Image (cartoon, coloured by chain):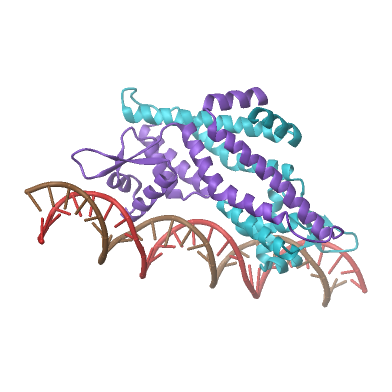
Chain colours: A cyan, B purple, C red, D brown
Amino acid sequence: MELAEAKQKFIEAWGKLGSEWGINRTMAQVHALLLISPEALTTEQIMEQLQISRGNANMTLRDLINWGLIEKQHRSGERKEYFFAEKDVWTIARQVAKERKRRELEPVLKLLNQLQEVQGDEQDPEYKTFKTSVTDINKLASNVDKTLETMLKAEENWFFGSIFKLFK
Amino acid sequence: MELAEAKQKFIEAWGKLGSEWGINRTMAQVHALLLISPEALTTEQIMEQLQISRGNANMTLRDLINWGLIEKQHRSGERKEYFFAEKDVWTIARQVAKERKRRELEPVLKLLNQLQEVQGDEQDPEYKTFKTSVTDINKLASNVDKTLETMLKAEENWFFGSIFKLFK
DNA sequence: TGAAACTTTCAATATTTATTGAAACATACT
DNA sequence: AGTATGTTTCAATAAATATTGAAAGTTTCA
């Protein structure tokens, strides 16, 4: 396969995967583009390569910065802004995990804790089932939360080294 | 908090979480409803509780069955179909992991393997960066895949017991 | 067989989400 | 101060997704 074709396919696949996981397709594609680019790119270049508008490019780049996945670069003597992506995939994975944990898991955990305090009749099957489900989900979610917490601190080698000894 | 209010909040939160992770909101809500219901419910009851149409309810229930999250129940002497959800959250988590792995992770892995065979000039920075990124992502994705594979086979206690010893 | 009870399908419609593009804003330079 | 170069905003629009509801399909049983 030619490089140009491979790039195209990679960007498409990354976009599709992103959208299946609740991440804007364009955002995933811009990320993919910067990830495989050896040089930092300007907004213009990104617009051209992905055929998107200036507004879209600008918003998407800002979102990616907020996710901690890309950074702005300034070059002396130039006014244009360049963008480049963190290239270490373990760092990227941790960054995504960190953001989604904060944005999505933590609010749910907070609610689950509140819901566990629901009042009701211990004899009522509706009440019992509700309480059991909420408690069980809460336990699982707390475990996931703790596991992510540890992952965020871990070095890649340590992480997979250990995981693999365990999961042989 | 009253049971009725708590139920409502749980269903809403589950729907929101689902949609943030690329799962249809209604599907997540129907699942939540069945999860906290001690009895199997009919299509009518689900339509009423969630204020959705018959068509929507029918399609959503079929999807949930395809995900392996709920089952049909037939009662002798009745023609109506009842639906109930698997209640063990570890089983649910595994089921979801299994389906998403199959539907989303595996196709991407297949593509990444192809993309690693891209032809090009080793001196070309474009080529080198592309190849490095794809190789690294492939490694990470394979590791995730293997980890999920192991998780699918694991008992909850074993899984978290081991994970926690590791992640102390 | 016929008709009641229930389920499924899918074109039309509504809702949600993403994208555009032009105007407003900002900055640096003459 | 004026203008050239670049960035940001956001109302309007387009595209993608989800939902409805009525018609067609299926099953059961008198």
Camera-nearest residue between B100 and A118: B100
Instruction: Say above or below: B79 vs B162.
Output: below
Residue B140 is situated, as x and y percent measured from the top left of the image, at 69, 43
Can residue A98 be seen here?
no
The spot of residue D30 in percent (x, y) is 6, 48
Quadrant of the snapshot with the C terminus of chain B: top right
- Viewer-nearest residue: A105 or B61: B61
> In this image, A48 relative to B105: left or right?
right
Q: Nearer the viewer, residue A19 or D21?
A: A19
With respect to residue B14, does A147 lie above or below? above
Q: Quadrant of the N terminus of chain B?
A: top left
Q: What's the residue at 37%, 47% (across, down)?
A: B61
The number of numbered discs placed on residues in the rendered structure image is: 0
User: Can residue A104 be seen in the rendering of this structure?
Assistant: yes
Which picture quadrant has residue D19? bottom left
Q: Position of residue A115 (x, y in %)?
A: 45, 31
Q: Which residue is at the front of the view, B100 or A72?
A: B100
Image point 66% across, 26% down: which residue?
A: B167
